[in-house]
Amino acid sequence: AFFQKHRCGDWCRRLRLRKDYEILAATHIVRMPGVSDCIAYLLSDCRALFAQLANSSGVSVKVPREANDDWLDIRLWATEKSGAKAQDLLERKLAGFYEKARSVVAVEPLPPWDACRWHAQLETWRRESGAFLVPFPSDWQKRGVVKELWAFANFLGNGRYNHKKSAYACKLIRETLEQAATATGGSSTSAATSSATTQPERWTQYQDKSGSKYWYRDPDGFWFWENDKQWEKFFDEASGCYWWWNKETGLWFYEPTKRD
């Protein structure tokens, strides 16, 4: 009970007492998109809320300072009842940000892409649109399914947002999903994947208009840029061929030999 009501002061600092979030695992977690404007929104607009939670309920809140992943954890230290209340308040605050800044594209029909293909496609959309994109749900990599794509507008200040880049991103996403649906005959079920796996695997190198090279795999449509940091290129002296290896997934293949 003492620590629930205790407020650190000068003596705590002199004694170098540590905060609860420095030594204990969080009791509650709220997931948030890894978008810098969302972090700034929480750190500025929610200061009063955080102070209220700390003073009235003894809740400690730790908001991430950097957008270093698609999804981040807002960590809370509180009793079960206070923590549940704080979670609800934070989710409402996030909903307010979503209402102003977020556009949502439903992934329908669902393309037969694996996690590597999704990562490559996300980076392409981000590079071409310049928008902040986040796949939903937050645990999509474990489930292997992306249900929605969230595109976030750029914050201009004074409560104003510029949706130009996010709108363009949504357009690109819809076009790509339509192309994927056409390529698979409109099927998003395992039947499409099963059909693809019966065909022999073939890798082909292509180059876009800017000169950037990428590899495309038939028949499933997986591809990646040659400058993707997840991929490394090696030379096999025994065969005289080059081969590629993905250090994140272990996927590898030999470049096809050129035939006269």
Image (spheres, grey):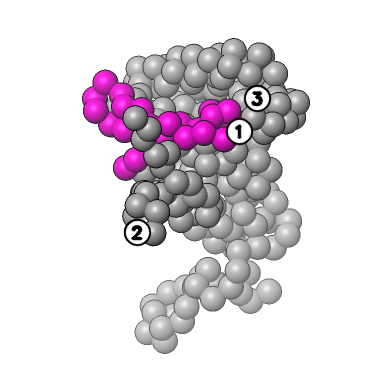
Look at 58% across and 73% down and name the residue there: 24
What percent of the width, then of the height, locates residue 88?
65, 43
Q: Amino acid at mark 1?
A: Pro
Instruction: Single out the mark in the foreground, 1 or 3.
Output: 1
Q: Amino acid at mark 3?
A: Leu
What percent of the width, then of the height, locates residue 148?
60, 28
Q: Residue 60, relative to residue 138: is it above or below?
A: below
The reply, left or right, for residue 19 in relation to residue 159 is: right
Residue 32 is one of the magenta-drawn residues: no
**Can the viewer see residue 202?**
yes
Tag 3 residue: 110
Look at 39% across and 39% down and name the residue there: 257
Q: Tell me the SS state at disc 1.
A: loop
Q: Amino acid at mark 2?
A: Glu
Tag 1 residue: 200
User: Residue lying farthest left?
Assistant: 210
Q: Tell me the SS state at disc 2.
A: loop
Tell me where residue 120 sits by quadrant: top left
What percent of the width, then of the height, locates residue 161?
36, 23
Pointer 3: residues within 10 angstroms few (<14), some, or many (20+)?
Answer: some
Q: Tell me the SS state at disc 3.
A: loop
Q: Which residues are magenta?
A: 201-227
Instruction: Single out the mark in the foreground, 3 or 2.
Output: 2
Tag 2 residue: 237
